[in-house]
Image (spheres, rainbow, N blue to C red):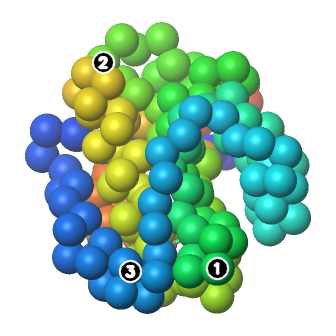
Amino acid sequence: MVTNMIVDLASAPLDTAQDEAALAHAGITFVNAQSADSATRSWIRARFSPTWAKEAYHAWNWFAYDKQGELAGFSSYEQRHYRWWWLRNWSAQSDTGIFGPIGVAAPFRNRHLGCVLTRKALASIRALGFARAVIPRVGPVEFYKRCCNAVIADTVRLFGIF
Ligand SMILES: CC(C)(COP(=O)(O)OP(=O)(O)OC[C@H]1O[C@@H](n2cnc3c(N)ncnc32)[C@H](O)[C@@H]1OP(=O)(O)O)[C@@H](O)C(=O)NCCC(=O)NCCS
């Protein structure tokens, strides 16, 4: 059973200025890039999963780097190479962008970096012209509720939609 969430991009809180200022003070910088190079994919594979590394390769991404230039976290969006079965209600909806995956390295958690990466990816999806974004196969439901007012969209089983 898989739960997807949905975000209304017109009303979601996507401002990051205050959190980004605090993170900048700690030396965190952000880069927006299409795809992910081999070193980045290795980093994602080692900390999260081989599938997420492949998804980042086929997606647009926001990357967060620490003051040494090491990756601290990433968020991906508009990955449409892999058509996951749990997105069957959403991937053909022309007003809906696709968020994820997202990961923050353990030492950088609980500093709002995950929320900034989430909001940056959602703002990029909105800038592409989408009205909504689907957050597939969650995951930390409360985190997405708190960060961007996401709500549960559907719960999908392999052989049915409930
Ligand atoms: C989920 C994840 C990205 C959160 O990153 P983070 O940088 O620690 O989160 P933030 O500090 O931005 O959290 C923002 C808020 O959500 C809360 N929060 C974070 N993770 C949460 C969780 N799992 N459940 C409930 N609340 C959570 C924080 O306490 C914070 O609350 P506040 O606004 O009251 O301070 C990170 O824990 C992670 O990489 N997890 C492993 C990968 C993963 O599960 N990805 C999601 C797949 S769908």
What is the count of numbered marks? Answer: 3
Q: Nearer the viewer, mark 3 or mark 1?
A: 1
Marks 3 and 1 in Cβ contact (< 8 Å): no
Residue found 55% across the figure and 56% down from its top: 63
Secondary structure under badge 1?
Answer: loop
Residue bearing mark 3: 23
Residue found 12% across the figure and 46% down from its top: 11
Sequence-first tag of 2 and 1:
1
Secondary structure under badge 2?
Answer: loop
Secondary structure under badge 3?
Answer: helix
Sequence-first tag of 3 and 2:
3
Question: Label for residue 29?
Answer: none
x and y, in percent, of residue 151 in the image: 32, 51
x and y, in percent, of residue 133 in the image: 36, 35
x and y, in percent, of residue 35 in the image: 66, 34
Mark 3 residue crowding within 10 angstroms, few (<14) / some (14–19) / many (20+): some
The CA span between labels 3 and 1 is: 14 Å
Q: Nearer the viewer, mark 3 or mark 2?
A: 3
Can residue 55 be spotted in the picture?
Answer: no
Cβ of mark 3 under 8 A from ligand 1 = no
Sequence-first tag of 3 and 1:
3
Q: Quadrant of residue 13?
A: bottom left
Can residue 71 be spotted in the picture?
Answer: yes
- Name the foreground residue: 6 vs 27: 27
Mark 2 residue crowding within 10 angstroms, few (<14) / some (14–19) / many (20+): few
Residue bearing mark 1: 68
Residue bearing mark 2: 95
